[in-house]
């Protein structure tokens, strides 16, 4: 099997440079590396050309979002498998490709394989000696996951309307409903430096909440769609309240955004069975 690597980046040239240097050391090497510079205004393009001259570089002059970028790269990739990374993440094991391939060769139902991360977001993981054993999950992180491309092309894939956030659990739901598996395994670990650049915690919360609601409208069957949507919105509001008044008072920002997308979601609605939806809900989230 062949492996492509994909990265979407925006204005994190220094982080991307570090990741590119690690990718050059992978043994065996990937079939190709695809990088999307999504609305970058720094020297990202120059970094790619100097550090990974053979990479396939896609330049979006205006930012289209990480979800659109990843969807395009998966569809354009030539590998059987696509290793998704962030510009600030990379595998710690340089032989990761040899570790990954047997999982997909031995399990035709495996759609996504993802890994534990040593991340600055959670400092306790940086020196953690062991991680959870292999188990099926209902989501994954695109900063360290491998997708089987043939399965991706059979399914709707990442919902481009999301722009950023929540494409992973929505895609995992598609996989589970179609009889495929999303597997967590510590066979590889990912070093995620989790850059603070181009990040807004509240904005990400709004996008996650909006997209979670849109996913319910797209995938959850009738008559359960209404109570599930209300529960999701209430849960996110509860989280905002726990973060404080300044968060709670700004919750209507994503409510209005979500309402504006309702006609789109209803027009594109493709619900799965309630049995499949419940099976997905019962799976644990990513560690």
Image (cartoon, rainbow, N blue to C red):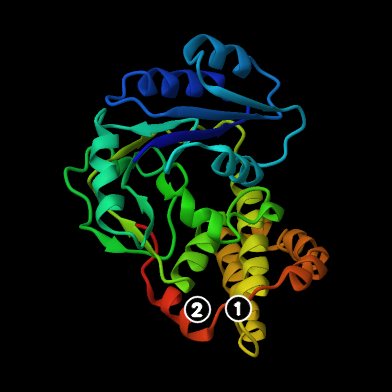
Of residues 125 and 58, the one nearer the viewer is 58
Of residues 78 and 25, the one nearer the viewer is 78
Disc 1, SS:
loop
Q: Quadrant of residue 192?
A: top left
Disc 2, SS:
helix
Question: Disc 1 to disc 2, how far (Cα)?
Answer: 7 Å
Q: From what the image shows, is residue 114 above or below residue 39?
A: below
Of residues 11 and 79, the one nearer the viewer is 79
Q: Which residue is mark 2?
A: 277
Left or right: residue 136 compared with residue 166: left
Toward the top, the furthest residue is: 50
Residue 252: image location, x then y, percent:
76, 64
- Name the image quarter holding the C terminus: bottom left
Q: Quadrant of residue 213?
A: bottom right
Name the residue at 62% across, 77% down. Answer: 271
Other residues around mark 2 within 10 Å, as few (<14) / some (14–19) / many (≥20): some
Q: Which residue is mark 1?
A: 220
Contact (Cβ within 8 Å) of mark 1 with mark 2: yes
Name the residue at 62% across, 17% down. Answer: 45
Of residues 238 and 219, the one nearer the viewer is 219
Which comes sooner in the sequence, label 1 or label 2? 1
Residue 90: image location, x then y, percent:
38, 32
- Name the image quarter holding the N terminus: top left
Name the residue at 61% across, 57% down. Answer: 208
């Amino acid at each position: 099997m062949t492996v492509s690597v994909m990265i979407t980046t925006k204005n994190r040239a220094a982080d991307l440079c570090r990741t590119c240097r690690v990718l050059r050391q992978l043994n065996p090497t990937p079939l190709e590396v695809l990088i999307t510079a999504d609305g970058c205004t720094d020297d990202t393009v120059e970094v790619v050309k100097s550090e990974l001259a053979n990479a396939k570089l896609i330049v979006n002059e205006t930012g289209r979002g990480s979800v659109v970028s990843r969807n395009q790269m998966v569809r354009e990739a030539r590998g059987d498998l696509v290793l998704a990374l962030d510009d600030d993440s990379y595998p710690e094991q340089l032989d990761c490709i040899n570790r990954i391939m047997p999982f997909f060769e031995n399990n035709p139902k495996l759609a996504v394989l993802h890994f534990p991360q040593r991340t600055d977001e959670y400092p306790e993981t940086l020196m953690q000696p062991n991680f959870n054993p292999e188990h099926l999950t209902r989501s994954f992180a695109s900063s360290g996951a491998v997708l089987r491309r043939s399965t991706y092309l059979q399914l709707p894939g990442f919902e481009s309307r999301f722009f950023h956030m929540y494409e992973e659990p929505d895609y995992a739901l598609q996989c589970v409903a179609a009889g495929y598996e999303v597997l967590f395994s510590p066979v590889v670990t990912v070093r995620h430096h989790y850059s603070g650049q181009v990040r807004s915690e509240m904005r990400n919360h709004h996008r996650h909440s909006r997209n979670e609601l849109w996913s319910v409208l797209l995938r959850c069957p009738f008559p359960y769609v209404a109570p599930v949507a209300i529960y999701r919105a209430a849960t996110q509001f509860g989280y905002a309240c726990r973060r404080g008044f300044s968060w709670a008072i700004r919750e209507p920002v994503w409510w209005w955004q979500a309402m504006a997308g309702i006609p789109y979601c209803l027009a594109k609605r493709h619900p799965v069975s309630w049995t499949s939806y419940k099976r997905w809900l019962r799976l644990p989230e990513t560690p």
